[in-house]
């Protein structure tokens, strides 16, 4: 549907784990009314999203990591990873 397919994972204890679809849905639904730059994001499965060509991946990573931490999804010592995939 969108031009870019990305993997969304978090690192915990040295292992990369796909972010659950629930987390990705939560982020995408919140952004329907807030940051319009992220409107072109579509969660498709655990650890997978499709995004539009205008979505800045570095800003997306920062915003998602912040949202996941505030929701209590992402452990404090974990890091969010976004990459082409």
Image: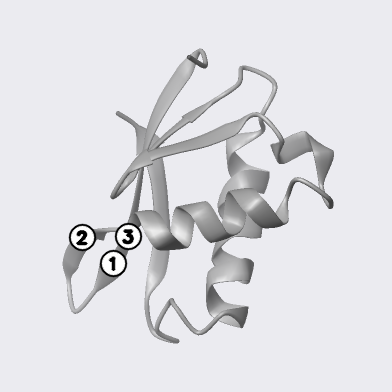
Quadrant of the frame with the C terminus: top left
Vertical position of residue 78 compared to residue 17: above or below: below
Q: Residue at x 20, y 60 (%)?
A: 16
Q: Residue at x 22, y 61 (%)?
A: 17
> In the image, is 69 to the left or to the right of 49?
right
Vertical position of residue 36 compared to residue 23: above or below: above
Report which residue position mark 3 lands on.
Answer: 20
Comparing labels 3 and 1, the label whose residue is closer to the camera: 3
Q: Mark 3 to mark 1: distance in Å?
A: 13 Å
Q: Mark 1 to mark 2: distance in Å?
A: 5 Å
Q: Are marks 1 and 2 in contact (CB under 8 Å)?
A: yes
- Residue 81, numbered label: none
User: How far across and how far down the image is residue 54, in percent?
Assistant: 70, 21
Report which residue position mark 1 lands on.
Answer: 11
Q: Residue at x 48, y 14 (%)?
A: 1
Vertical position of residue 18 compared to residue 82: above or below: below
| Colour convention of the picture | one colour
Report which residue position mark 2 lands on.
Answer: 16
């Amino acid at each position: 549907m969108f031009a870019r397919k990305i993997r969304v994972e978090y690192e915990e204890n040295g292992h990369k784990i796909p972010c659950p679809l629930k987390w990705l849905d939560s982020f995408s639904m919140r952004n329907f009314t807030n940051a319009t730059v992220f409107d072109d994001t579509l969660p498709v499965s655990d650890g997978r999203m499709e995004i539009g060509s205008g979505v800045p991946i570095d800003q997306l990573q920062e915003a998602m990591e912040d949202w996941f931490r505030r929701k209590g999804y992402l452990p404090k010592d974990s890091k969010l990873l976004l990459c082409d995939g």
